[in-house]
Amino acid sequence: MIVAAGAAAVAAVLALQAQPEPIGDRGSWHLIFDDEFNGSRLDTSHWSTGWFGSGVTWPVNPNAPECFDPRRVSVGGGSLNVSVAVKPETCEGKTRPYAAGIVTTNGKFSYRYGYAEIRAKIAVSAAGVVYDWPAFWTDGQNWPADGEDDIVEGLGGRLCWHFHSAAGVPGTCKQTPVKPGWHTFGADWEPGSVTYYYNGRRVGRITRGITAAPMYLILGIGADAQYGGPTRAATFRVAYVRVWQHS
């Protein structure tokens, strides 16, 4: 019995040691959400496709040139894949020239304070310009009063972070070209502040207008050249999504 109890204790310690930690913000964390996209289908206990609806839905921005189509969302090769296609789609009574993918945890997972992180591969040009409008962000139920945290999004071909609230939209963009390949993007949301980390390095901190209501996760891509970068039939690949809270 003593040996069995000892073995169980060792197993528990090893399990804790094996849990991943936020890159760039080590500390006393425990994992509360983790999708590694190791299978061949989207885990619908975590995610829904579409924007406030099922099937083909309208875009986040009503004037955007894409509809969100579940066929632009897949899981395979160790990643979630959301893509843009040159394909006319009709949503909310309007035909738009592009189809795009989005997934959210709305109604399935939300959190209040913590560290959210993804490992992702974003399509970029040879000059390091981000194609389309890929984004990893969180949103509350009552916008903007409940907040919106844009952890990383491609705006004007650059990678940017902002926090939306009734107080405004503080934030900025990374000025250097984006290297091809895989990167990590994370944000530590604490009372009164959000600190942003790209590839384990702190890139910014926002302390104005930080909200406290729970927010859900969103991963998507759009084709809106007004806000995003040059439009291409590109894919936003995500190897994992993890959320931690302090132990």
Image (cartoon, rainbow, N blue to C red):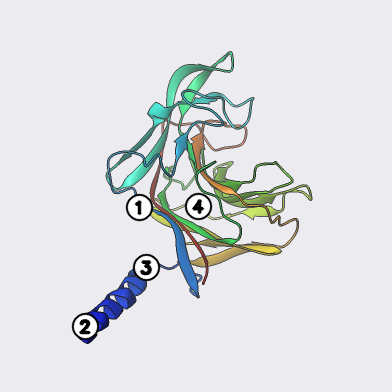
Camera-side residue of 63 and 54? 54
| Figure check: 145 above or below 222 | below
Looking at the image, tell me whether mark 2 or mark 1 is earlier in sequence order. 2
**Residue beneath disc 1:** 36
The answer to whether one can see residue 132 in this image is no
**Residue drawn at x 40%, y 39% as measured from the top left:** 44
Question: How far apart are the alpha carbons under marks 2 and 1?
Answer: 36 Å
Q: Which of marks 2 and 4 is nearer the N terminus?
A: 2
Q: Is residue 7 visible?
A: yes
Give residue 1's mark: 2
- Mark 3: few, some, or many residues within 10 Å (few <14, many ≥20)? few
Amino acid bearing label 2:
Met
- Residue at mark 3: 19
Select label 4 or label 3 by which is in front.
Answer: 3
Q: Name the residue nearer the viewer: 187 or 174.
A: 187
Front-most of 77 and 40? 40
Q: Return the residue at label 4.
A: 177
